[in-house]
Image (spheres, rainbow, N blue to C red):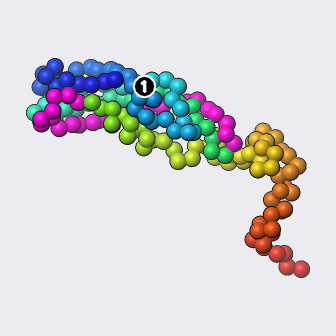
Amino acid sequence: MLKFTLSEFKEGVRVPVAGEYDPKQIEVEFPDLHYVAPVRLEGFAEKTAGTFRFEGTLTTRARKTCGRCLKEMESGFSEDFDWIYETENRETIDPADNVRELLIIDHELAYLCQENCKGLCPVCGKNLNENTCKCRQSSYHSFPVIKKLKPKKES
């Protein structure tokens, strides 16, 4: 965990800093997204009159699950940040809330492995991006509600 003790910083001096967070400790995991590496912060910190600035880059790796076909994919994540904190009546600065917020805001509502992902067959469960199945076409027409929604052809 990264925590800054303000008394250790001289005003107007930029200091290189680095630290890591365990994603489970800062509670940023989702059912469709699991971090497979620590959340790493690297950058510079500077104390000025009344403020503390921490700027740099956040990096990590995550495993995402497609919302349609359930295929998992691992990818890197990198995001620049520039956070400014008021220092009045404070002895320490802990950027954990900012880290959590940045990762939550970046989380996609529905991750897709590809834009035109076909998903899973609702009958047999086959991944329709990889295979076709015979039950797919007939299953859509077997629901009476769908038949009512389908426009009738004029003869």
The quadrant where residue 155 appears: bottom right
Magenta span contains residue 77 = yes
Quadrant (top left, top right, bottom left, bottom right) of the N terminus: top left
**Label 1 residue SS:** loop
The quadrant where residue 74 appears: top right
Q: How many marks?
A: 1
The x and y percentages for residue 123 are 80, 49
Magenta span contains residue 109 = no
Residue drawn at x 12%, y 35% is 89
Residue drawn at x 36%, y 25% is 41
Q: Which residue is mark 1?
A: 22
Magenta residues?
Answer: 69-93
Residue drawn at x 62%, y 45% is 67
- Main SS of the magenta segment? strand
Above or below residue 62? Residue 66 is below
Is 139 positioned to the left or the right of 62 in the image?
right
The x and y percentages for residue 5 are 19, 23
The x and y percentages for residue 21 are 39, 25
Is residue 146 among the parts visible in the rendering? yes
Q: Nearer the viewer, residue 96 or 13?
A: 96
The quadrant where residue 138 appears: bottom right
The x and y percentages for residue 39 are 42, 26
Give the residue type at disc 1: Asp
Is residue 42 among the parts visible in the rendering? no
Is 88 positioned to the left or the right of 121 in the image?
left
Which residue extends farthest bottom? 155
Residue drawn at x 23%, y 37% is 84
| Circle 1 residues within 10 Å: few <14, some 14–19, many ≥20 | some
